[in-house]
Amino acid sequence: MATDVRTSPVRPARARRRSSQRTTLWAMLLALPTAWMAVFFVASMVIVVLLAFGTTQRDGSPVFGTNLGNFTALWDEVYLRLFLRSVVYALATVVLSAMVAYPVAYAIALHGGRYKNALIAAIVVPFFASYLIRMYAWKALLSDDGLVNSGIRRAGLGDGLTFLNTPWAVIGGLVYGFVVFMILPVYASLERMDVSLIEAGKDLYHSPWRTFFSVTLPATRAGLYGGMVLVFLPALGDFVSAQLLGGSRTFMIGNLIQQQFIGGQNWPLGSAMTVAMMVALGILMFGYLRATATPARET
Amino acid sequence: MSRTAPTTSRRAFLRGGLAVGAVSALSSCAYIPDDAPAVAPLPRSAKAKVDGDLGYFNWADYLDPSVLKGFQKEYGVKIIESNFDSMEGMYAKIAAGNQYDIVFPIAKWVVKMRREGRLRAIDHEQLDNADQVFYSGSYFNDPWYDPGSRVSVPFTVYKTGIGWRTDKIGSMTGSWRDLWNIEGAGRIFTLDDQDEALAMAALLLGYDVNTAKPSHLDEMRKLLVSQKKYLRAYSSDDINNMTSGDAWIHHMWSGDFLYMREGLAKNKATFDFEAPEEGAPINSDTYAIPANARHPGTAMLFIDYLLRPENAVKNINYLYYPFPVRDAVGAFQDLAKEVPACDVDVADLENPDVFRLLDPAAVQRRTATWTEVKAS
């Protein structure tokens, strides 16, 4: 809209009218999503927050209240350990995702040529299949008598690996589940980057590694950081990977919350866990935004 | 059987608590304290006659599809199927006012729903095949969860025990201690189910499967934690874990075991099942008609249809779970003849190891114990 005004200086009045019409149009278009978010997102969050102060009544249904006990109950070694474990898994997921996503995005953005869009589609399409189904596919692939291990045995490379039900399986599942959220923003920032920068970098530094770390990586920092957040958040709260691929010592915070709601008949405690986690993540996000605000403006 | 076997088990998979749906039920409960009468009056039974299409609410894939098709054809009605993936999810939907004509609660949920007046009476006089389950002397004339069988009809009964690989494990003792068997270390699974896991520990210690006494729970927690070094995972996907070779010893449901052995396994002889001597939890699924059903008459006909022995036989051969339908019992015994431990007899039904409805404080204490076990 701003550019519209600027590019038609001759007839500002008409431009302004068009601009205000557009504002109305935008307002109308925004009304539906705003109402949707208010009703289904904000309202449900409000219920979760209120319920965190609630109790469970005798018939098992949760009721609102003003009870702080759910929060004091969280200050428990067991829960803190689970939270730390989840953070470690989520961080490992972020690191591994970056190691997978960056080369993939780089190869497609800079060497994909006219197949770029097809390659990106090839990466995105499998993610249309439910996360749950893909986890099950992993189980079939990686179980002790699964395809991978049968292959290893047939090729005479040993007895096969025990992969399922280990922390690595959980982290692997998380990476597989969320890596696309890293690939896309990194791809977008590589796409936008001026390739001549790399050429200039090569002239300046000679070594392709130094070029990468001094030119390419800084130029795509915003996309990489964005991808890290997009992977970290769902990985931290996930319960599917730990449930399907995990072992007896890979219980995560998401499993804990789910357990309060399903078998535990303790929605208020589950809600308090959710709120506490949102607060913790909110603080982390705030720190992240503060830390990245300046470099992002530079680029 | 010509079924293109979905290698995921129907109930174990769902019941394991991938209950994404149940979480969405969060918005559907009353949050305002509600002092409903302790025992609500029983809504009257409907007459068995077609009064509309059948709203059917069950675990996914928990009935032979050909039986559903047969009912639609014979009575000229449609079956509109919905599924739940946990009892909590089922209950939340019904409590929120969703209307279904027939629902499949597990025993202790019958207690809860009957108490709250959420289930309609079922008049046995209306059912031509009532004597298939309510014959004289039948346990189900007066089951523990539904005195007088006023609101429910028994569907399946099953027990929880231990399945194992006979080609890998030579030393089984017939005790729950077998879940600590060193021979299977790293290949042992315990069901990812609060009630089942706690019951297993309680039985080993000689306690009631429903115990919520803090001192008992503390001992049970220690016992279960001591199992961890032998354990590969907590999982309710018992069928897949066995067929994929991940599990050599699995805490599992008898019906799942039988389906896995008879329906899926390449080499049946390498699988066996035991119901441990300390006691095996017995559970029953039932069908019932919600009080707010729109077409209870069709639901009555449907119940009657499921009680026909030929339909019960079809369901047995599809599900591998025993049905207490008199003239179909033989079909199950045929299926289970090589693993009689999977069968559930009257003595099993009368045993005290059933999961009862507990008050929320007790459930929460049990959950806290289970959480500590899983998190340690």
Image (cartoon, rainbow, N blue to C red):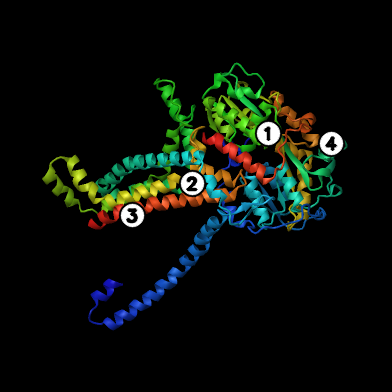
4 or 1: tag closer to the N-terminus:
4
- Identify the mark at residue B320; answer none if there is no mark: 1
Q: Nearer the viewer, mark 2 or mark 4?
A: 4
Q: Quadrant of residue B43?
A: bottom right
Protein chain holding label 2: A
Amino acid type at mark 4: Ser
Protein chain holding label 3: A
Amino acid type at mark 3: Leu
The answer to whether residue B213 of the structure is visible from this angle is yes
Give the labeled residue for mark 4: B138
Give the labeled residue for mark 3: A289
Q: Nearer the viewer, mark 4 or mark 1?
A: 4
Q: Could you say which is closer to the camera, residue B55 or residue A19?
A: A19
Q: Quadrant of residue B149?
A: top right
Protein chain holding label 4: B
* Cα–Cα gap, marks 2 and 4: 46 Å
Q: Could you say which is closer to the camera, residue B33 or residue B58?
A: B33
Protein chain holding label 1: B
Residues indicated by labels 4 and 1 sit on the same polypeptide chain = yes
Q: Which x, y percent locates residue A208?
A: 18, 41
3 or 2: tag closer to the N-terminus:
2
Q: Indicate the secondary structure of the residue bearing disc 4.
A: loop
Q: Indicate the secondary structure of the residue bearing disc 1.
A: loop
- Which residue is at a point 63% across and 27% down the rendered structure image? B261
Amino acid type at mark 2: Ser
Q: Nearer the viewer, mark 3 or mark 2?
A: 3
Amino acid type at mark 1: Tyr
* Cα–Cα gap, marks 3 and 2: 31 Å
